[in-house]
Image (spheres, rainbow, N blue to C red):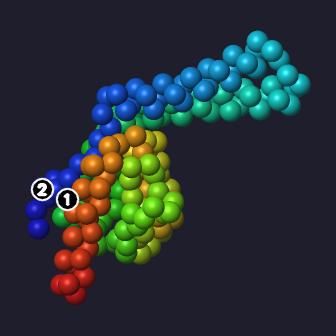
Amino acid sequence: MSSEVLATIEASAPRRVMGTAMLGAVGCILVYVSFSAPPSPAWLVFLLAVGAAALWLAVRMWQATVHRIELTAEELRCSDGQLIVKVEEIEAIDRGFFAFKPSNGFLIRTRASSARAWMPGLWWRAGRRIGIGGVTPGSQGKAMSEILAALLAQRNQDL
């Protein structure tokens, strides 16, 4: 098997800007409201905490969406070198309408649990589930999921 990249998913510049700008705007509005018209102390703390979390998330999304997701015959990886999952560990792919999956993406179920990881706007991993997608184009997500499904079908046929 080769390590040739079969498919990639990456966020375009307009998607990156829109996603992070919206999160940043929500954070700024919440912080502004908490200082301009201070509510009761409990609400003040809540507004500041949620506003700061939104601003932090906007920064994390901006940093994460610089990278792309690459599919080879052996693995699904991030362009920063982080291994997302080996193809041999994948049990199933869920692309259904009602699946708990990221926007424009798909859900992968693995045979064994892995450590939690999260790159906002690109992918997340929690236990046996991995979500691929977010601020990425749906066409790239669909193409990658179909190629991955073909790899799994070929693997199951060989068994």
Q: Quadrant of residue 121?
A: top left
Q: Quadrant of residue 149?
A: bottom left
Name the spot of residue 100 as percent of width and height, x first: 51, 60
Q: Name the kind of residue labelled 2 in the image.
A: Glu
Who's the residue at 31% across and 52% down the image? 141
Marks 1 & 2, CB-CB < 8 Å contact: yes
Q: Which residue is mark 1?
A: 72
Name the spot of residue 75 as percent of width and height, x first: 26, 61
Q: Secondary structure at mark 2?
A: loop
Q: In this view, which residue lies farthest toward the front? A: 97
Q: Is residue 85 left or right of residue 125?
A: left
Q: Which mark is residue 4?
A: 2
Earlier residue among tags 1 and 2:
2
Residue in the foreground of this view, choosing between 112 and 152: 152
Disc 1 residue crowd, few under 14, some 14–19, many 20+, Cα 10 Å: many
Residue in the foreground of this view, choosing between 64 and 121: 121
Q: In this view, which residue lies farthest toward the top? A: 36
Name the spot of residue 50 as percent of width and height, x first: 68, 32
Residue in the foreground of this view, choosing between 64 and 134: 134
Disc 2 residue crowd, few under 14, some 14–19, many 20+, Cα 10 Å: few
Image quarter hosting the N terminus: bottom left
Q: Secondary structure at mark 1?
A: loop
Is 54 placed above or below 8 here? above
Q: Name the kind of residue labelled 1 in the image.
A: Thr
Asked if residue 30 can be seen in this view, the reply is yes
Who's the residue at 50% across and 56% down the image? 116
Name the spot of residue 136 as percent of width and height, x first: 35, 42
Residue in the foreground of this view, choosing between 48 and 20: 20
Image quarter hosting the C terminus: bottom left
